[in-house]
Image (cartoon, grey):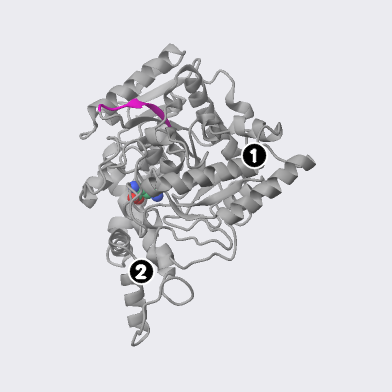
Amino acid sequence: MTDLHRLSIRELSEGLAGAKFSSRELTEHYLKRIAKLDTQVKSYVTVTAEQALAQADAADAAIKAGTATALTGVPIAHKDIFCTQGIKTTAGSKMLDNFISPYDATVVAKGKAAGLVTLGKVNMDEFAMGSTSENSFYGATANPWNLGHVPGGSSGGSAAAVAADLAPFATGTDTGGSIRQPASFCGLTGLKPSYGRVSRFGMIAYASSLDQGGPMARSAEDCAYLMNVMAGHDAKDSTSVEKDVDDYVANLNGTAVKGLRIGIPKQYFNVAGLDADVKARVEESLKKLEEMGATLVEIDLNMTEAYVPTYYLIAPAEASSNLQRYDGVRYGYRAENSVDLMDLYKRSRSEGFGAEVQRRILIGTYALSAGYYDAYYVKAQKVRRLIQQDFLKAFESVDVIAAPAAPTTAYKIGANLSPVEMYLGDIYTIAVNLAGLPAINAPVGFDKDNLPVGLQLIGNYWSESQLLSVVHQYQQATDWHTKRAAIAEENA
Ligand code: GLN
C-alpha cells in the first residue's frame, strides 16, 4: 500500500489487527518517507530505523500471538525531551548533544509496553524555551504548510513530523503552549492535559510546576488513543495524581456539544496583535459549534494583562533552578582545558547553552536572588493564584473557554522577533499552565497565506475527555483536520 500514511490511528489499529498490512510494512513506509522528505522538513534529530524495525517485528509477532494492544505496531515520534534508554536525548541543546539516558521516561516506557514503534526523536527549542523551534542546537525545522515558515515551538519537530506525515502521531510537552501553539501553526490537534495527569518522570525539566506532556496528532480521536497510553499515576513523579484515568477513546462519542456553554473572554478578542484572519476563523468555528447546539457566553478574564509578566518570571525562575544541574561534571557538555572548577562551570555553561536559555537563566536567577525574591518571585506566585481564581470563577458559569491558540499564524523562519515580541505571542496559552488546567487546540481553517489557524478550548480540571469529545464532534461535522500540506501528499 502506498498511502498508509493517510490512515488514522483507528484505521492503523484495525488494519494491523486484521492483517491488512504488517507493522514492518508500516514502519518501513514511514522510514522511507522520513529518508525522502525530512531533508526538507528537518523534524527529526535522531531516526532510530534499526530499533524501529526490531520493535515492528516484535509487534507483528504479538499481533499473531493475540497479545497485542490497540496500538501494537503503530509508529510514533517522541519529542527529544523524553529520555529514551540507549538513544540520544538532546532537549535540542549542545549541552546534551552526547547524552544517552540510562532509562526511559515513563511516557516512553508506557508507549513501549503498549507496543508502539519509536521512529525517532524530534526537534524542539532548546530545553523547550521558545515558540519557533529555531532555538535548537540542531537548526530550524520547517512548517510543512510553507517551508519558509516555522512550525511553532517548542514541540515544533513533533508538529512538523505529523503534519508532513512523517509520523502518525507524536508526543509533545507544554509548559506555556508548546503543544497547542505548534499544533495551531501546523493544522493539528494537540492536547495539554491537566497538571499531574501525565507523568513527568524522565521528561527533561524546564519549569517543573508548569511542564506537562501530551499528544499531538491529526484529530481528537488520534489524540485520544495516545492519551490512553500516556495518562495515569506514576509513583516516580510525586506531582502525578492518583486519580482514575478515563477511556478517552470510548468517551469520544456522546453529546458533548449539545448544551455546552462556551465562555468567550472579552479581553481575549481585544488583544493588540490579534491577526484579523485568526480572529475571523476562530469566530467562524464558534459559530459552527453554536449551530451544533452550544451556547456562547461572554465572560471576563480580568487578569489577562498579567499573564505574560507572571509566566516570564515563574518559568525562568524554575528554569534557572532546574538547569543548575548542567555543570559539565557528571554528564552533558564539558569545556576543554579548564584551569579550575569555577572556570569549568563557567565555560561549560557558556558554551553549552544557547542565547535564549542563558537569557532565561539570568532572568530567573535575578528574580530568585535574595534582594529581589519578594518583589518578583513571590509577587508572581500571588498573581498566579489570582489568575487561577479568575478561571475557576469563569467555570462557575461556563463549561469550556474559547480562545485562539496564538494571536498569529506561523512566523517566517528568521523573522527575528525581539524576545519581548516573542513572549507576547504566548498570551493565549501560558495562563492555562499557570492554573494547571487542560486545553486543546483544533484546526479551524487557514489565513490568506494558506497557513493554519487553531481554536483553543480550555477546560476545567480533569476535563480531558470532554475536550477531546467536543473537538471530535466538531471534527465529525467539519473537515479542517483532514486537510494536508502539499509535502504530506508526496509519496516516498
Ligand atoms: N513559548 C513558551 C516559552 O518559550 C513555550 C514553552 C513551552 O511550552 N515549553 O516558554
Query: Residue 279 or 324: which is nearer the viewer?
Result: 279
Q: Quadrant of residue 354?
A: bottom left
Evaluate whether residue 464 shows in this view.
yes
Residue at (44, 49) in percent of width and height: 210
In this rendering, is residue 343 above or below 91?
Answer: below
Could you tell which of marks 1 and 2 lies nearer the N-terminus? 1
The overriding secondary structure of the stretch rendered in magenta is strand
Q: Which kind of residue does numbered mark 1 sit on?
A: Leu
Q: Secondary structure under badge 2?
A: helix
Residue 71's tag is 1
Residue at (33, 87) in percent of width and height: 339
Report if residue 443 lies within the magenta region: yes
Q: Which kind of residue does numbered mark 2 sit on?
A: Gly
For the magenta stretch, what is the residue range? Answer: 441-448
Q: In the image, residue 323 lies at what x, y percent?
A: 40, 65
Which of pointers 1 and 2 indicates the residue nearer the eye?
1
The residue beneath circle 2 is 352
